[in-house]
Amino acid sequence: MRRIVIFWVVFLIGMSLEHAYPEKVSQGWWLSQTLGASINPVGIDTTTQVSFKFPLYLDKEGLLWDSTHWAFGAENSLTPAYDTFSFVLRIEPIAFFDLRLQGGIRYAYDALGFGYTPLPDYDAPFDSDSRRDLDRTDGFGFRYQISPTLKGAVGDILFASTFHGVVYDMQSLKDVEESYFYEPSANLVLKKRDGYVGNETVLAYRYSGTGFLLGVIHAILYVPASGYVTERFSVLGNYGTSLNAKTSIFFSLLAGYYPRDRYLSYREGKVYGAFQIGINRKPF
């Protein structure tokens, strides 16, 4: 079990494509629950989000304005390696752009053998075999993220491109001598106070009236302080449907490969796979 890499990548279908096709936003509370897993790297994640949405322009109508809104809420992401509680603010001032701001507390726990993993430097090996016998610990830190998205739809063709800027501050772990650590959610090495940037771009086709969507995704992450890059191409399949006026569900599958990655490159014979299921409900 200790050889498992705990990793989860956010599906764009749950973030950007959900709103790529403009639809009228209704005011009220929303509850979202997702469960996902991936292979190469291996991981599992469950995320719960509660938010309040409010239309941004009550006096404007039309394609550019129907989907505009703001939303504020709380999100909790739980994996076998960490628990992250965050406050989330999302603003969509026009149909083709939205901005997501997120900040909160991350608790790394070692109860299952996947705790905070100190490393001596950026070049330290972080594959599962190398990490298996390393000392781990519990501890609190902070995580902040900004994610602007450009998106749009032409008929049934959907497009979304999201930039991510992510910062971690794990300096509260003062008893840990090493200044670097393995970050499982992105599968890379960071300093105690460090970050990375990335982009995820998806192009998809929606089969109207069926609930099915197929697409391709390009994702890339870059650590400015070390120059490390990981890049992935994937194909996406998604099915979503409404159970009633207040509840919808979706299922997503991803399969792909890494043109660039220290351990997961296709040159090493690795392929990527993931799935996610989720439910969105307006409880009131």
Image (cartoon, helix red, strand yellow):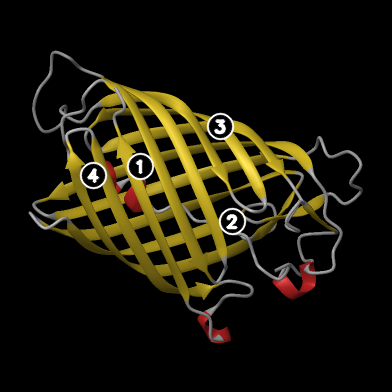
Q: Residue at x 37, y 66 (%)?
A: 254
Instruction: State which mark lies toward you, 2 or 1.
Output: 2
x and y percentages locating residue 174 in the rendered image: 88, 38
Helix or strand or loop: what does disc 3 sit on? strand
Of the numbered discs 2 and 1, the one sitting upstream in the chain is 1
Instruction: State which mark lies toward you, 2 or 3.
Output: 3
Q: Quadrant of the C terminus?
A: top left
Q: Nearer the viewer, residue 250 or 127?
A: 250
Q: Which residue is mark 1?
A: 149
| Three-letter amino acid code of the residue under disc 1 | Thr
x and y percentages locating residue 233 in the rendered image: 40, 69
Q: Quadrant of residue 260?
A: bottom right
| Three-letter amino acid code of the residue under disc 3 | Ser
Give the numbered dot on residue 133.
Answer: none
Q: Is residue 121 left or right of residue 55?
A: right
Q: Quadrant of residue 138?
A: top right
Query: Does the CB distance between marks 2 and 3 fall below 8 Å?
Result: no
Helix or strand or loop: what does disc 1 sit on? strand
Give the numbered dot on residue 86.
Answer: 3
Give the numbered dot on residue 186.
Answer: 2
Of the numbered discs 2 and 4, the one sitting upstream in the chain is 4
x and y percentages locating residue 197 in the rendered image: 54, 49
